[in-house]
């Protein structure tokens, strides 16, 4: 733990971790491809090609993974978005020193209560994306388990998991109920 009480990894202060997570350490050529993908968003093939080139130059970098996730999600390519969400979840688990399997993570394993702690927050948002995509793809039981895990890790619900739980709870009810 650092002087601020936030989790530090490899002795790096949170500010440096946030910079790395959000794009720091990204090779200039990979960043150029991410920007080109954004400019080519309306041309799926070209945008995806740039994203794949960025991924080849900076495999596993959060900025590239987030770019891929957003591309697939907003293009309605939900199975591919789920694959990237799973890669992000594995990365977030490693970066936070958590169990590989999300259902084994406990609230005491990281500072999930501090919304300013970037790495635990990245984990929570990634698990929320995973839960949402599971629901959208019809995997309701898996989605519910992930939402329940989110609420266990974030009982104050800073990331809005209760909304997803509400959707699941309302499924199958008549509008007249």
Image (cartoon, helix red, strand yellow):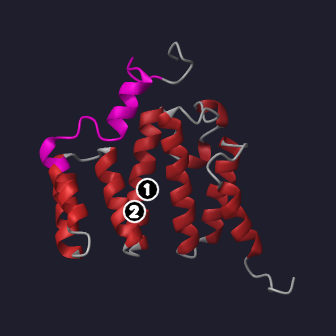
State which quarter of the image contains the C terminus.
Answer: bottom right
Residue sitting at x 16%, y 71%? 46
Instruction: Please indicate whether residue 85 sits to the left or right of residue 155 in the image.
Output: left
Q: Position of residue 108 (x, y in %)?
A: 65, 30
Residue sitting at x 54%, y 23%? 6
Instruction: Please indicate whether residue 18 sits to the left or right of residue 68 in the image.
Output: right
| The residue stretch that appears in magenta | 8-31
Q: Position of residue 61 (x, y in %)?
A: 29, 44
Q: 136 or 17: which is nearer to us?
A: 17
Hey, which residue is sitting farthest right in the picture? 177
CB contact under 8 Å: marks 2 and 1? yes
Mark number displayed over residue 86: 1
Q: Position of residue 114 (x, y in %)?
A: 61, 32
Q: 17 or 137: which is nearer to us?
A: 17
Q: Label 2, label 1: how many angstroms apart (C-alpha)?
A: 5 Å
**Which of the 4 quarters of the picture holds residue 152?**
top right
**Which of the 4 quarters of the picture holds residue 145?**
bottom right
Q: Does 105 lie within the magenta span? A: no
Label 2 packing within 10 angstroms: few (<14), some (14-19), many (20+) = some
Which element carries disc 2, helix, strand or loop?
helix
Residue sitting at x 22%, y 60%? 51
Which element carries disc 1, helix, strand or loop?
helix
In the picture of the structure, the residue carrying the numbered disc 2 is 83
Q: Does 25 lie within the magenta span? A: yes
């Amino acid at each position: 733990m650092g002087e601020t009480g936030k989790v530090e990894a490899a002795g790096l202060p949170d500010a440096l971790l946030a910079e790395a997570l959000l794009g720091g350490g990204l090779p200039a050529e990979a960043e150029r491809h991410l920007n080109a993908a954004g400019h080519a968003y309306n041309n799926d093939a070209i945008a995806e090609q740039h994203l794949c080139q960025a991924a080849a130059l900076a495999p596993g970098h959060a900025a590239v993974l987030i770019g891929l996730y957003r591309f697939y999600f907003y293009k309605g390519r939900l199975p591919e978005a789920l694959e990237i969400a799973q890669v992000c979840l594995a990365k977030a688990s490693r970066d936070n020193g958590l169990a590989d399997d999300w259902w084994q993570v406990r609230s005491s394993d990281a500072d999930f209560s501090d919304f300013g702690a970037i790495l635990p927050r990245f984990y929570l948002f990634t698990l929320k994306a995973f839960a949402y995509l599971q629901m959208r793809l019809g995997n309701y039981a898996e989605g519910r388990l992930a939402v329940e895990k989110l609420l266990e890790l974030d009982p104050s619900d800073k990331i809005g998991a209760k909304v997803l739980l509400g959707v699941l709870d309302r499924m199958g009810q008549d509008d007249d109920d």
